[in-house]
Amino acid sequence: MRTFVALLLCMAALASRGAESAPLRLTQTIPLPGVKGRFDHFAVDVKGQRLFVAALGNNSLEVVDLAAGKRIKSIAGLHQPTGVVFLLDLNQIGVANGGDGTFKLFDGSSYELVNNVGGLDDADNARRDPKSKLIYVGYGDGALAVLDSAGRQKLGNVKLAAHPESFQLEADGPRIFVNVPDAKQVAVVDREKRAVIATWPMTEFKANFPMALDAAQHRLFVGCRRPARLVVLDTATGKPAANAELSGDTDDLFYDATNGRLYVSCGDGFVDVFKAGVGESYPRIVRLPTRGGARTSFFSSDLGKFCLGVPQRSGRDAEIQVYATGDK
């Protein structure tokens, strides 16, 4: 009997240890009934635990309370919303709209429109520089727009060879790394000079859309669709350092420095998780099944959450799947 009890305790301990080590654990499924079409990019209000979801196909911005596990607001009447940034110091939400070429600001409490910047045809990804507070928006046939820290006026442009997709800002340096898939390159921008200072070719692995940055290890992670591949570039030289097999139709990619992982959401119906920081090896440790079309996501290191946008499909409502990443 004692042997049997000891065996049960051992099995329970092993099961618990296995659960604890899972890189992604589904903790919430938040329904978004009535939201149709595909999602684009997300942003988060860490203090308020709000997730802002650009529902591009639905022409709306969905505001989700992660703590309560429910949608609290849907801002309708947008025009193909794409990039989203949350301005914590102003409690405002900036939304880039590809359909009408605008960057709209909404009050973070009332959700009323407070400002509208036009002239940004095919506006896409948006980022805010944490130091200067300037806002960058990719748009048009090839440019990054530079907006003031309040997102109320356009200050200038950085010309690119073609339309930009994901881009990442160096925290302790002046560079911006930009995926420019139609030009088969990663452009390196000096944001002080507002000019391209280098281009790194993407000729073997193309259709480079998502991107993440590990500045400490000088590694840039690029998700490619043709063929499906995770490509790792050395940010000191621009040379390839590694590559790994990836699920198809990727659109978002995040680096988790705390756990040494990469999370890649892919429209083929998988989230790929890679181990990062082990020499030049980036093994895929999990290929998590999701739902076809679920290719956009967001990772918050502060909240320890990975949020996946799952579009309406086959009679099933759209939803946000929230995963714990093990560090919170």
Image (spheres, grey):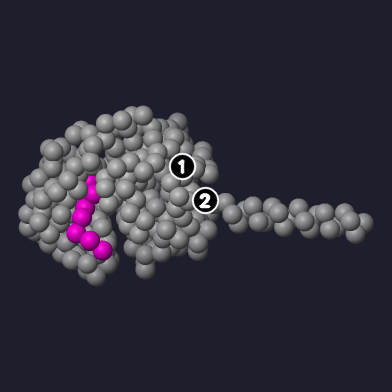
Asked if disc 1 and disc 2 are in contact, CB closer than 8 Å, the reply is: yes
**Residue that carries the numbered disc 2 in the rendered image:** 24
Task: Using the rendered image of the protein, determine whether residue 33 is visible from the camera's viewpoint.
Answer: no
Mark 1 residue type: Val
**Relative side of 221 to 28, left or right:** left
Q: Give residue 271's mark.
A: 1
Q: Residue furthest bottom?
A: 89
Mark 2 residue type: Leu
Which residue is depicted at the point 23% across and 37% down? 201
Q: CA distance from mark 1 to mark 2?
A: 9 Å
Q: What segment carries the magenta color?
A: 172-178
Mark 1 and mark 2 lie on one chain; the one further toward the N terminus is 2
Which residue is depicted at the point 46% across and 42% down? 271
Q: Position of residue 225 (x, y in %)?
A: 34, 32
Which residue is depicted at the point 31% across and 30% down? 204
Callout 2 environment at 10 Å: few (<14), some (14 to 19), or many (20+)?
many
